[in-house]
Amino acid sequence: MCYLNHMMSGKRLVVLSGAGMSAESGLKTFREMGGLWESHDVTEVATPEAWRRNPGLVMRFYNERRKALLEASPNPGHTRLAELERFFDVRIVTQNVDDLHERAGSTHVMHLHGELRKARSSADPSLVYDIDGWELKMGDLCARGSQLRPHIVWFGEPVPNIQDGIREAEKADVFVVIGTSMQVYPAASLIYYVPDHVPVFVIDPNEVNLHEDHRIQVIKMKAGDGIAELARRLGVDLG
Ligand code: OAD
């Protein structure tokens, strides 16, 4: 199916991205073979209980992630999404904690699961700081003297930005799911808030477990090529 350029121009393109979006930048996904949850026990590194039990281990896990992120660069998928802003009002709702969408030039990026390059107070969640470099240490304190923790939404914690994410899904003219297994809620529920008449595209080289829905067009490709194909189907030429 091909949409005419003039019909889609300026429309709101809402993207839900996940770890697969950054795979071509060399960052690991979570649930695939060789993914992060194969080599790390999620309950030991990504829960509030883990932080209480063994904060050093949690800190080390996210320091490693941050180090990898600082060595990574946006891939053609990130860049092409940023380029789509020339044609659409692009809104990115990401489960990713990396900053590769921003570094590629996307201007509307909402993080559902936190941001790796930020720390926050363990006493007052409103105290959020940029982390200089890759390392956050035990003994690094907020302005109120409490230990800083990774600015990550852990399993079992509320997702503060989910209402904003829902509002984006409700306002979509086109909804695009990229590189997520759609297994983690509430993020995966956003697709249910997309209005009935809105086309939904799913870009992923592997099978994604989604409900039957005639609106869904699967683009079975990696993010970089998949977004180029999406652009073609929407009738725009990214050059
Ligand atoms: P997953 O690891 O569950 O899923 C990654 C998806 O990316 C899979 O569907 C892959 O097929 C797909 N994929 C792999 N390479 C790709 C590529 N080059 N281009 C496009 N897609 C590709 O990761 P998420 O769905 O993002 O949360 O996981 C959701 C949440 O679970 C994460 O935000 C994280 C994790 O636990 C927290 O840590 C709170």
Image: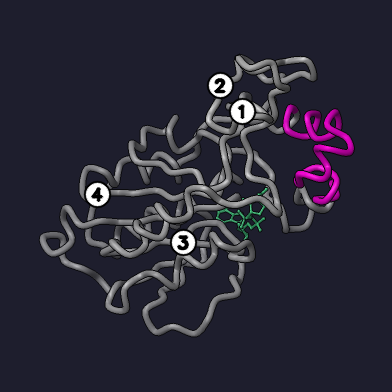
Q: Amino acid at mark 2?
A: Tyr
Q: Residues within 10 Å of mark 1 (few under 14, many from 20)?
A: many
Q: Amino acid at mark 1?
A: Arg
- Position of 86 relative to 62 (above/below): below
x and y percentages locating residue 156 in the rendered image: 70, 54
- Position of 115 relative to 92 (above/below): above
Mark 3 and mark 4: Cα distance apart in space: 16 Å
Q: Nearer the viewer, mark 1 or mark 4?
A: 1
| Direction from residue 227 to residue 132 in the image, left or right | right
Secondary element under disc 2, as helix, strand or loop, is strand
- Find out whether the residues at labels 1 and 3 contact each other: C-beta distance under 8 Å: no
Q: Nearer the viewer, mark 2 or mark 4?
A: 2
The disc, 1 or 3, on the residue closer to the chain's N-terminal end is 1
Mark 1 and mark 2: Cα distance apart in space: 6 Å
Secondary element under disc 1, as helix, strand or loop, is strand
Residue 120, numbered circle = 1
The residue pinned by badge 3 equals: 177
Q: Could you tell me which residue is drawn at 45 percent across and 46 percent down?
A: 77
Q: Amino acid at mark 4?
A: Asp
Give, as a single range, the part of the protein colored magenta.
40-63
Q: Quadrant of ligand 1?
A: bottom right
x and y percentages locating residue 78 in the rendered image: 44, 42
Residue 129, numbered circle = 2
The disc, 1 or 4, on the residue closer to the chain's N-terminal end is 4
Residue 60, numbered circle = none
Mark 2 and mark 3: Cα distance apart in space: 30 Å
Mark 1 and mark 3: Cα distance apart in space: 29 Å
Q: Could you tell me which residue is drawn at 61 percent across and 32 percent down?
A: 116
Mark 2 and mark 4: Cα distance apart in space: 29 Å
Q: Nearer the viewer, mark 1 or mark 3?
A: 1
- Find out whether the residues at labels 1 and 2 contact each other: C-beta distance under 8 Å: yes
Residue 89, numbered circle = 4
